[in-house]
Image (cartoon, grey):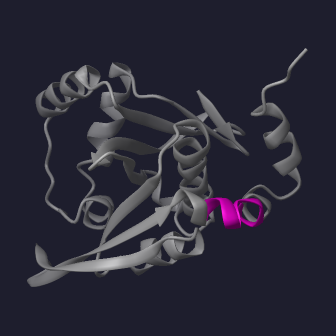
C-alpha cells in the first residue's frame, strides 16, 4: 500500500467489484471519467475485466481510501508502457464519491500517482488523457505540472456532440524541478513526515 497525506492507495481486490459496479454505472461519473455516460457495465463484465487485470504484470490498479474515515473514495491506475526504450506510464483516476469533487482530492491523488511513478517506479515520462469538456481535470493536470501536448479530434460522442481528447504529459526531470513545491501545496505540514517515511534508513 502507498500512503500520501490522508490518502491510502491499496490494491484492487475482487470484493471491490460491488463498489465499482455502482461507480461505473453512474451516468455523471462516467461522463467525466470515461467519456461514456451510458457505460452500463454488468457485474459479469467487471469480473471478467478484473481477471484480465490480475494477469497484467506491469500495471497497477488501486482503490483509494480516505484514511481519516477508512472509506473508499475512488479508483486509480498506473499503466506502464514503453515508447521505444523509454519507460512511460499512463495515469488514470476518478473520484467515485461525487460529494468529494472540487475538494482538492484530485490534486493530491495526481501528485501521489506522480510520486509512485517517478520516485518509486523509475518511470521517465507520464501521460494522461482527458475529454475536451472536462475542464476540472485539465486544471488539475496543469496544476500538477502536466503540459498539454496534443489534441485528438472528435474522439467521443456525448450529449449530441462530438468532442476531442486532450493529451497531457510530463517528464521526470520536469517533475523533480517542481516536486517539493507540489508536495508542500498538497501535503502542507505533513510533507516532512511523508518524506521521512518514504526514505530508506541505513543503519
* Figure quadrant of residue 12: top left
Q: Give above or below for 35 relative to 7.
A: below
Q: Give above or below for 17 relative to 80.
A: above
Residue 172 as seen in the image, left or right of residue 58: right
* Figure quadrant of residue 161: bottom left
Residue 44 as seen in the image, left or right of residue 10: left
* Figure quadrant of residue 79: top left
Residue 122, given in percent of the width and then of the height, sits at 52, 40
Number of numbered discs overlaid on the protein picture = 0
Residue 54, given in percent of the width and then of the height, sits at 28, 22
**Main secondary structure along the magenta-highlighted residues:** helix
Residue 137 as seen in the image, left or right of residue 41: right
Q: Give above or below for 151 relative to 54.
A: below
Residue 170 as seen in the image, left or right of residue 132: right
Quarter of the figure that contains the C terminus? top right
Return the residue found at the far bottom.
Answer: 161
Q: For the point 70% across and 60% down, which residue is it?
A: 179
Quarter of the figure that contains the N terminus? top right
The region drawn magenta spans 175-182
Q: Is residue 34 magenta?
A: no
Q: For the point 37% across and 62% down, which residue is it?
A: 128
Residue 111, given in percent of the width and then of the height, sits at 60, 56
Residue 83, given in percent of the width and then of the height, sits at 28, 52
Q: Nearer the viewer, residue 73 or 10?
A: 10
Q: Give above or below for 63 relative to 166.
A: above
Q: Nearer the viewer, residue 177 or 103?
A: 177
Q: For the point 79% across and 41% down, which residue is it?
A: 194
Return the residue found at the far front.
Answer: 85
Amino acid at each position: 500500500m502507498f500512503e500520501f497525506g490522508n490518502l491510502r492507495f491499496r490494491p484492487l481486490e475482487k470484493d471491490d467489484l460491488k463498489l465499482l459496479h455502482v461507480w461505473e454505472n453512474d451516468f455523471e461519473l462516467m461522463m467525466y471519467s470515461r467519456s461514456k455516460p451510458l457505460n452500463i457495465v454488468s457485474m459479469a463484465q467487471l469480473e471478467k475485466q478484473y481477471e484480465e487485470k490480475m494477469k497484467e504484470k506491469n500495471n497497477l490498479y488501486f482503490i483509494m481510501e480516505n484514511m481519516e474515515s477508512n472509506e473508499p473514495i475512488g479508483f486509480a491506475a498506473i499503466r506502464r508502457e514503453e515508447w521505444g526504450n523509454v519507460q512511460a506510464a499512463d495515469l488514470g483516476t476518478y473520484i467515485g464519491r461525487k460529494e468529494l469533487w472540487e475538494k482538492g482530492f484530485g490534486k493530491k491523488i495526481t501528485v501521489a500517482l506522480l510520486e509512485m511513478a517517478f520516485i518509486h517506479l523509475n518511470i521517465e515520462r507520464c501521460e494522461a488523457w482527458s475529454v475536451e469538456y472536462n475542464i476540472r481535470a485539465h486544471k488539475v493536470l496543469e496544476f500538477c505540472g502536466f503540459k498539454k501536448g496534443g489534441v485528438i479530434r472528435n474522439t467521443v460522442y456525448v450529449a449530441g456532440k462530438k468532442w476531442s481528447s486532450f493529451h497531457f504529459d510530463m517528464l521526470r526531470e520536469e517533475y523533480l524541478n517542481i516536486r517539493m513545491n507540489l508536495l508542500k501545496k498538497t501535503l502542507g505540514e505533513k510533507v516532512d513526515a511523508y518524506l521521512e517515511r518514504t526514505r530508506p534508513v541505513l543503519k
